[in-house]
Amino acid sequence: MIIDPNDVSISSVYESMVALITPRPIAWVSTLSPDGVANLAPYSFFGGVGANPPTVMFCPVNRLDGTAKDTLANVRANGQFVVNVVTEEFAESMKETAADVRPDEDEFVLTGLQKAPSVKVDVPRVADVVAAMECEMLTSMQLGPGRGGANLVVGRIVSFYVADSVTGTNGLPDPERIFTIGRMGGPRYTRTRDRFE
């Protein structure tokens, strides 16, 4: 079977991509609006870009009406965001923060999650996550307009938070202690406990 993206709907292209690009890490991105309202939302089109400079990227899509989601609007307004690492115990809370709510609603409050202050950015992180990356925006570009239009946000990591419980003897994050989850196709996720070398 051959699927030509030009011959099928945007949703069919999306479903094909998320079924094939798996597992996808999840950037649980916290931001602040110009009015100081916290926003928290997950993005699975996400990845590390490089270590020099330390850089990550995520791709928020436009709302159904073609406007920017709160995360994107906030990052463009103040140039800061935090990528919270999603481990198994936060799966349900992460899913709840994917809901489309008004810009004046704080997802931390809606889900009962606690905030913790960041070190180098004004945006809070999720308290009790095992790790988070504080970022300053390097660039943001619109890749596609209108409904479902893709946007790319690239940020420079200016500080890492790593809980002592997942820090190895070398003082760095120990991947054997960090049980992240990954996004699969549709509403499915995967655990990362099954590992091999």
Image: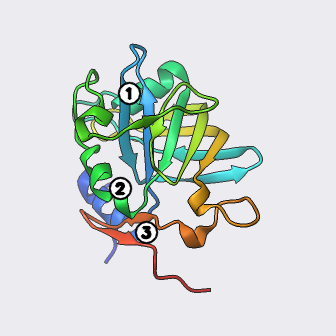
Which residue is denoted by mark 2 in the rendering?
90
When asked about the image quadrant of residue 21, the answer is bottom left
Q: Position of residue 87 (x, y in %)?
A: 43, 60
In the image, residue 29 above or below residue 9: above
In the image, residue 101 above or below residue 35: below
Amino acid type, residue under disc 2 in the picture? Phe
How far is mark 2 from mark 3, CA to CA? Answer: 17 Å
- Asked whether 36 or 79 is in front, the reply is 36
Q: With 124 as the anchor, is 7 left or right in this view?
A: left
Which residue is denoted by mark 1 in the rendering?
38
When asked about the image quadrant of residue 176, the answer is bottom right
Q: With 67 as the anchor, is 193 left or right in this view?
A: right
Q: With 20 as the anchor, is 79 left or right in this view?
A: right
Residue 23 bears which disc, if any?
Answer: 3
Q: Which residue does the image show at 30% across and 27% down from the upper left?
A: 67
Amino acid type, residue under disc 1 in the picture? Ala
- Note whether residue 139 is visible: yes
Q: Which residue does the image show at 41% across and 17% down from the upper left?
A: 36
Secondary structure found at label 2: helix
